[in-house]
Image: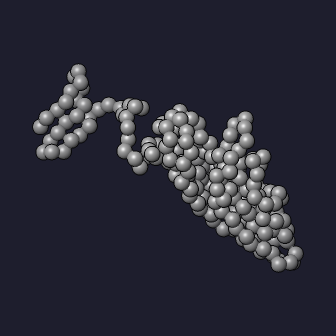
Amino acid sequence: MATLKLGSTTAISESSGAITYDAGTIGSNINYPAGMVVQVIHNTIAGSGSITTSATGNPSASDSAIMTATITTKKANSKFWIHGSMESHINPNSGNLGTYSDLWRIISGGTDVHIDYVAKSHIEEYNSDDTFHMSWPNSWSYYYSPSLAAGTSLTVGIKIQSAGGGAYWHYDNGGGDPTITITEIQA
């Protein structure tokens, strides 16, 4: 068995060909291999409730995000795997046509930047006498490749709009709490 000590602390040991890193912190100047996960953040809206929108069409830069997550990059030019889940819902007798859910980069004090259309659910009531409620889960993922310096705060969010009529977005309406997870990946 061999060991490498720094002062009185064993940093690395070897036994029968197996190397163990016994102590220490990986510094910020370490070069990770491409594809290695650098960090993961997760945001969940807990509890229950809903948001109603009557605005139609795809969300715009001026619309508010209903759910966000923020990560501060540890490495320059990282890639990000962004994924999440949520539930949409329509009510009877309201002319609902479903929802559009889009992923946006949220720019504090600036103009938000559209990333991708993550979920479009088009469900239509055929007449005003339709008496049904319908809920459906949406899960989505997106691989995002911006050029960002290390230490940059990246906020992403989901914005929703109605596909026509009105739409309801539920927090934990039996489909689980809505979530966004951002994974930073070494480029």
Can you say whether 70 is above or below 84 in the image? above
Quadrant occupied by the N terminus: top left
Q: Where is residue 58 in the image (x, y as percent from the top left)?
A: 75, 58
Q: Is residue 177 visible?
A: no
Q: Position of residue 86 (x, y in %)?
A: 63, 59
- Name of the residue lying farthest toward the right: 128
Percent position (x, y) of residue 23?
Answer: 29, 32
**What residue lies at 62% left-to-right and 42% top-to-bottom?**
155
Q: Going 68% across and 40% down the picture, which residue do you hit?
A: 107
Please tell me which residue lies in front, 166 or 104.
104
In the depicted structure, whether residue 46 falls above or below residue 56: above
Q: In this view, does 90 lie to the left or right of 171?
A: right
Q: Position of residue 51 (x, y in %)?
A: 76, 54
Q: In which quarter of the image is residue 48?
A: bottom right
Residue name at image x 18 percent, y 45 percent: 18
**What colour scheme governs how the chains and residues are painted in the rendered image of this protein?**
one colour
Q: In which quarter of the image is the C terminus?
A: top left
Residue most toward the top? Answer: 7
Establish if 87 lies above or below 8: below
Left or right: where does residue 164 sit relative to residue 169?
right
Q: Viewer-proximal residue, 45 or 181?
A: 181
